[in-house]
Amino acid sequence: MNSLAWLMMILASMVGAVLFATIGAILFALLLANVSNQLTRNDGHYRDYWNY
């Protein structure tokens, strides 16, 4: 393969890795938000944690 093909392959793999990491981070943040929401919703003593 010539240098242009190598360059295109490396750039494509870098773009794919960045997209994969971005999608993974977004899904992880959504999972954490969902778990946090369920914990606060199902917690019977949620008023104990707030200073009223």
Image: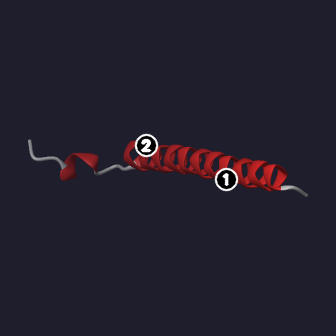
Image position, residue 9 (x, y; %): 79, 52
The residue to which callout 2 is attached is: 37
| Cα gap from disc 2 to disc 1, whole angstroms | 35 Å
Horizontal and vertical percent position of residue 36: 42, 49
- Residue at disc 1, secondary structure: helix
Front tag of 2 and 1: 1
How crowded pointer 2 is (Cα within 10 Å; few <14, some 14-19, many 20+) is rated as few
Which residue lies under the disc numbered 1?
14
- Its colouring scheme is secondary structure
Residue 1 position, x and y percent, is 91, 58
Residue projecting furthest to the front? 2
Q: Secondary structure at mark 2?
A: helix
Residue appearing at x 77%, y 48% in the figure: 8
Amino acid beneath label 2: Asn
Left or right position of 43 against 29: left
- Quick one: which residue is furthest to the left in this view? 52
Figure label count: 2
Question: Circle 1: is it few (<14), some (14-19), or many (20+) Cα within 10 Å?
Answer: few
Instruction: Tell me the quadrant of the picture where the C terminus can be found.
Output: top left
| 37 lies left or right of 13 | left
Q: Nearer the viewer, residue 45 or 6?
A: 6
* Residue visible at 67% across and 47% down in the picture: 15
| Numbered label attached to residue 1 | none
**Kind of residue at badge 1:** Met
Task: Give me the residue at 16% from left, 47% from top.
Answer: 50
